[in-house]
Image (cartoon, rainbow, N blue to C red):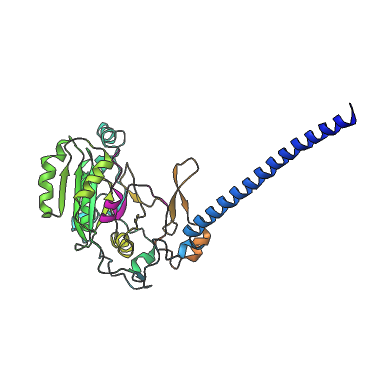
Amino acid sequence: MSFKRRCVELRRILRRQSVLILIFLTSVAGFVYFFSSVTNEFQTIEEKHRHPKDLSTSDDLPGSRDPETVLHDGQIGNFEQLPVVLPPENLNGEGEDGRAIVTDLNSPKVRRAISEYGFNTMASDRTSMNRSIPDVRMKECKYWHYPEDLPSASVVIAFHNEGWSPLMRTMHSVLLRSPAYLLKEVILVDDFSDKEHLKDKLDDYIKQFNGKVKLVRNREREGLIRTRSIGAKAATADVVIFLDAHCEVNRNWLPPLLAPIRRNRRVMTVPVIDGIDMNTWAYRRVYGEADRHFRGIFEWGLLYKETELSEREKRQRLHNSEPFRSPTHAGGLFAIEKKWFTELGFYDEV
């Protein structure tokens, strides 16, 4: 190859390499610009939505401490009710003070009741509608003082073919242990039951409460969620409280649920839930000692579970019995402002 031809070939190679280098440098510059723009955009979004580092004490988040809800150590709270005075024949009655009721679990009647209702209604039927249950709270819970002008409450209880005594005891416990001026109504929502004891007998039974207990009947089976929404729409109080149809509320249960909503209408409040044994109807704690607190979370598999408060958060709390924030909850029992629930669209219909 002649020298002249070699020079032409060399110039062509250099020209091609220059084009490739230019393309490479342009690509790098474009990537750097794109990455810088995206980073700046994310930084702007992060700064816009950034919360304070100490979320447990921030007043910018719902559930901050209420200066009008105060614990006075050793001074009984303003909503603590005196123990219910039972007739002498009930003092040692079966199931009183939440004691277990013993039945033969192998009995055909008991087995049939468990199969039909999901728990031993034969045991439930043997104890009073107004039975006493133990106060299992921490001692300091009784020293909380709440604002007197709390919002009113409608308690919604949805049911379908529920056993008579568990349903009625749920309603009785609400009426028995709620300040009358705060409890506007109890709304029973019948999701198209076909049990005879939930027809005329129920209509007649609630008449004794002079309108405090209302009954809404679905014309077809709607399911639990739509039935709850129907009850919420029928509610006329400031706050809607949902209970299952086989609960018993305990001493001074209502003001602690209403006070945080009074301070911030977008707060949903959830009670600590104790247990009632399905076979013996014994009342008991679920979480062990009363001073242990658990919040609801989702694990990586998106399954609901509960985890105990961290030691760091425990140290930041002024009182062990004060409310704490939780990102989610089990779903069955909670209180929410009626207008806020309406704005949210109630439960999803589908």
Q: Position of residue 282 (x, y in %)?
A: 32, 48
Looking at the rendered structure, the number of numbered marks drawn on it comes to 0
Q: Give the magenta range.
A: 325-350
Q: Nearer the viewer, residue 117 or 229?
A: 229
Q: Position of residue 49 (x, y in %)?
A: 47, 58
Q: Is residue 35 left or right of residue 290?
A: right
Q: Quadrant of the N terminus?
A: top right
Res 142 → quadrant: bottom left
Q: Residue furthest top?
A: 1
Q: What is the residue that sits farthest to the front in this orientation? A: 4
User: Magenta span has 346?
Assistant: yes
Magenta stretch: includes residue 290 = no
Residue appearing at x 49%, y 63% in the figure: 52
Q: Position of residue 297 (x, y in %)?
A: 45, 49
Q: Nearer the viewer, residue 208 or 46?
A: 46
Q: Relative to 82, is 101 above or below?
A: above
Q: Position of residue 162 (x, y in %)?
A: 23, 40
Q: Where, by quadrant of the figure, is residue 158 drawn? A: top left
* Quadrant of the image containing the C terminus: top left
Residue at 14% x, 36% y is: 196
Residue 127 visible in the displayed image: no
Q: Nearer the viewer, residue 14 or 215?
A: 14
Q: Determine the residue positioned at 54% across, 56% down.
A: 43
Residue 209 visible within the image: yes
User: Considering depth in this image, is 61 or 66 the residue closer to the camera?
Assistant: 61
Q: Is residue 43 above or below residue 218?
A: below
